[in-house]
């Protein structure tokens, strides 16, 4: 039998609920989500549990309007709170914080937001201007409301993870940020709440993204150019995939220098549209030869 988490909607309830744990010096863990929870989120909760021991694990479920651009999927983003509570119960989550938009932004859109810096205009930021300002602003607010010792984010949204780490460091927020490896379907597709938008044929084609990244990782021993070529060749095998970017960067998402020593760690990132659905994925890899080419 699993004990269901306590569901709270207001800041007051949340603060009241966490006060005893805080007073007892227990660590508080936070897994910020937008709901539509799947196994990937469950693995974040399990990791949060490991980091707080018997302290409370809080999962926030909030579809944050501030991070959606015009024409994005804010209205159709899946809202599945009843099912989400079951996922949280199975992972032994203590508290689910599911605030309304007014609870998070009582005065409407905030006048003060978190400026995410230059990385936010690259990769995802090129097609989603303002997205990371919305993400960092809500994450900063959640940190203020929950006051977690540790917060867990998936590596699937790798640029988001890098920017959150940067925010925590630059603004001295004192939260330990833990990244969790991407969970995948058996055929390699990275788990994502947006996968449910895919029609059967698109779902089939979507596996090309992880295949391309794996091909790049295989060829990385011959250098960056070989890795990117292998990924591109794989991407060309899919019909309906509209490539947005394929890039090789440092683990901090800086540009790779032209010459890197063998054994340099890197990250390959891809984004593509399948019909109306935009998917992203990434993998770490190790370059074993000098690099001369770093993007598509
Ligand atoms: O990754 C997400 O689900 C969201 O961007 C986050 C971190 C919960 C902020 O709304």
Image (spheres, helix red, strand yellow):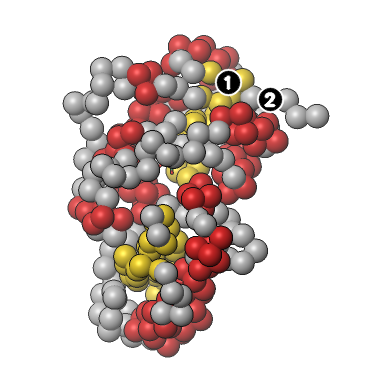
Indicate the quadrant of ligand 1 in the picture. top left
**Left/right of residue 288 with respect to residue 120 in the rendered view:** right
SS state under label 1: strand
Give the quadrant of residue 21: top right
Residue at point 40% right, 49% down?
161
**Left/right of residue 70 with respect to residue 207 in the rendered view:** left
Residue at point 29% right, 44% down?
71
Nearer to the camera, 12 or 263: 12
Residue at point 32% right, 41% down?
68
Q: Does the residue labelled 2 lie within 8 Å of ligand 1?
A: no
The answer to whether residue 158 is above or below residue 86 is below
The answer to whether residue 116 of the structure is visible from this angle is yes
Circle 2 residues within 10 Å: few <14, some 14–19, many ≥20: some
Circle 1 residues within 10 Å: few <14, some 14–19, many ≥20: some
Task: Give the residue pinned by disc 2.
Answer: 4
Give the quadrant of residue 220: bottom left
Nearer to the camera, 271 or 228: 271
Which numbered circle lies on residue 7? Answer: 1
| Image location of residue 35, percent across then percent down | 51, 36
Residue at point 58% right, 49% down?
40
Q: Quick one: quadrant of the N terminus? A: top right
Q: Do the residues labelled 2 and 1 touch (CB within 8 Å)?
A: yes
Q: Quick one: quadrant of the C terminus? A: bottom left
């Amino acid at each position: 039998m699993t004990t269901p988490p306590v569901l709270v909607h207001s800041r007051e309830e949340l603060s009241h609920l966490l006060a005893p744990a805080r007073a007892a010096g227990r660590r508080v863990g936070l897994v910020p989500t937008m709901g539509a929870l799947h196994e990937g989120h469950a693995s974040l909760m399990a990791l949060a549990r490991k980091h707080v021991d018997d302290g409370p694990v809080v999962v926030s479920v909030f579809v944050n309007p501030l991070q959606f651009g015009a024409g994005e999927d804010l209205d159709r983003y899946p809202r599945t709170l009843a099912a989400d509570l079951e996922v949280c119960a199975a992972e032994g989550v203590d508290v689910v914080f599911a605030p309304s938009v007014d609870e998070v932004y009582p005065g409407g859109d905030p006048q003060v937001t978190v400026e995410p810096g230059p990385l936010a205009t690259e990769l995802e930021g090129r097609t989603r201007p303002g997205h990371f300002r919305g993400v960092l602003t809500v994450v900063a607010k959640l940190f203020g409301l929950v006051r977690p010792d540790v917060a867990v984010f998936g590596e699937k949204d790798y640029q988001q993870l890098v920017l959150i780490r940067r925010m925590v460091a630059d603004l001295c927020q004192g939260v330990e940020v833990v990244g969790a490896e991407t969970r995948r379907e058996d055929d390699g597709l990275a788990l994502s709440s947006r996968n449910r938008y895919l029609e059967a044929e698109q779902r089939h084609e979507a596996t090309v993204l992880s295949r391309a990244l794996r091909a790049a990782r295989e060829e990385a021993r011959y250098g960056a150019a070989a890795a990117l070529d292998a990924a591109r060749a794989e991407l060309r095998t899919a019909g309906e995939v509209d490539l947005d970017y394929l890039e090789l960067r440092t683990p901090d998402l800086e540009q790779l220098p032209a010459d890197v020593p063998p054994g340099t760690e890197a990250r390959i990132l891809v984004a593509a549209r399948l019909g109306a659905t935009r998917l992203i994925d990434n993998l770490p890899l190790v370059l074993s030869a000098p690099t001369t080419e770093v993007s598509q």
